[in-house]
Amino acid sequence: MQSNRKDLPMKINEIIEKMRQEKLESLFILKPENIAYVTGFKPSSASVLILKEEPLLFSTKLDMEAAQAQSCLPLEEFKSLEELIKSLKETLNGKMGIENSMSVGTYKKICKNFQTAPNDIIEGFRAFKSKNEINKIKGAIRIAEDSFKDIDFSKFSGSEDDLAAGLEYNMRKAGSVKPAFETIVTSGPRSSLPHASSSSQELGNPVMIDWGALYENYASDMTRSIVQSQKEEEILSVLLEAQKEAINAIKPGIKASHVDNVARGVIEEYGYGRYFIHSTGHGVGLEVHEKPSLSSKSDEILEKGMVVTVEPGIYMEGKFGLRVEDMVLIKNSPKILTELPRKISSKNL
């Protein structure tokens, strides 16, 4: 057993207490990240966690060996949804909580047999990172940063795909089972596409790189823009100022939307407001995008223990786009977890 196993029962008790408050007899959990959060085991195939007074994890034969080694909960084989529903009907009578992410097909089968209540109880708990979780996130950050440092940009020649592949190879070699998400490398006019896939196009100027690693199931997420021209330098300076002000605004008890408003205000002041086309940031943990959302429409309140990105961007269609993204731990004073220099200039790209 891993040393962090001892804090899982307390976590489960807290979740069950929250279920009681919401008058739920059970939670029907399918999402692999939610199962991993509760049990310590992240399934690779169909698994169902039934959270109740006596929780039980159901896994297929494909995952049975790994689940037995890693899960803190009793385990049974998952054979079919129909068989599981039939078994649960004999023991559960009260309201069942289901995840908002449940597919329509599965929901139809569940709601025929149980009184259900969509909820995000597990996601709510996941927003607050324990010391152990924060250390895993830091591990994912170190892998991503070291992988970036291992590329000599002054000598690099090749395509966007080549650079993305190089980063992903470095991360894999450093201990990341896979990238936290598809590595984004865009350059030249393509850099105005915030989430475009990399291409076979030779690197142009500027270059925008968005990448992340996984460490023990926890993700990192950061973006760096490598600039060359005076205009690119100017835009990057605006973004760095917006990011700095947004990070300084982060503290427990404020609305997440306030951070977005601060970043957006700086960019608007310089006349680039209409080119900032996404939210300022998001939570990161077992998933790259999770609670809270640093968006203008968010009514979430920031609290200690949350880990968020702060990533203002400016994208001018047909010209170029830049973004800078770092990860921040919310404390009384915000702590920036990422350490890679934010201002990167190369005359050799």
Image: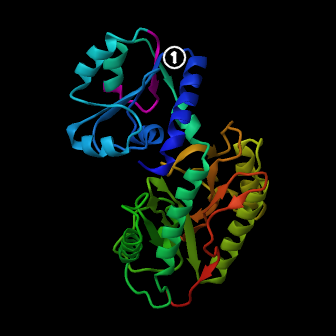
What stretch of residues is rendered in magenta? Answer: 94-105
Q: Quadrant location of residue 68?
A: top left
Q: Nearer the viewer, residue 159 or 46?
A: 46
Q: Tell me the residue that label 1 is attached to.
A: 24
Residue nearest the viewer, comparing 226 with 168 = 168
Q: Where is residue 85 in the image (x, y as percent from the top left)?
A: 29, 18
The picture places residue 337, in percent across and down from the top left corner, at 64, 63
**In magenta segment, residue 38:** no
State yes or no: residue 95 in magenta: yes
Answer above or below: position of 254 versus 269.
above
Q: Which residue is drawn at 64% across and 53% down?
A: 280
In the foreground, 138 or 150: 138
Q: Relative to 52, does residue 331 appear above or below in the rendering?
A: below
Q: Left or right: where does residue 255 sit relative to residue 62?
A: right
**x then y, percent, for residue 77:** 24, 31
Residue 71, image x, y percentages: 38, 40
**Residue at image point 69% right, 57% down:** 273
* Callout 1 crowding tier (Cα within 10 Å): few <14, some 14–19, many ≥20: many
Picture quadrant where residue 57 is located? top left
Q: Is mark 1 on a helix, strand or loop?
A: loop
The residue under the point 55% across, 35% down is 11
The answer to whether residue 1 shows anywhere in this view is yes
Tell me: residue 40, above or below residue 47: below
Q: What residue type is labelled 1?
A: Leu
Instruction: Tell me which residue sits at (55%, 28%) in the image.
Output: 13
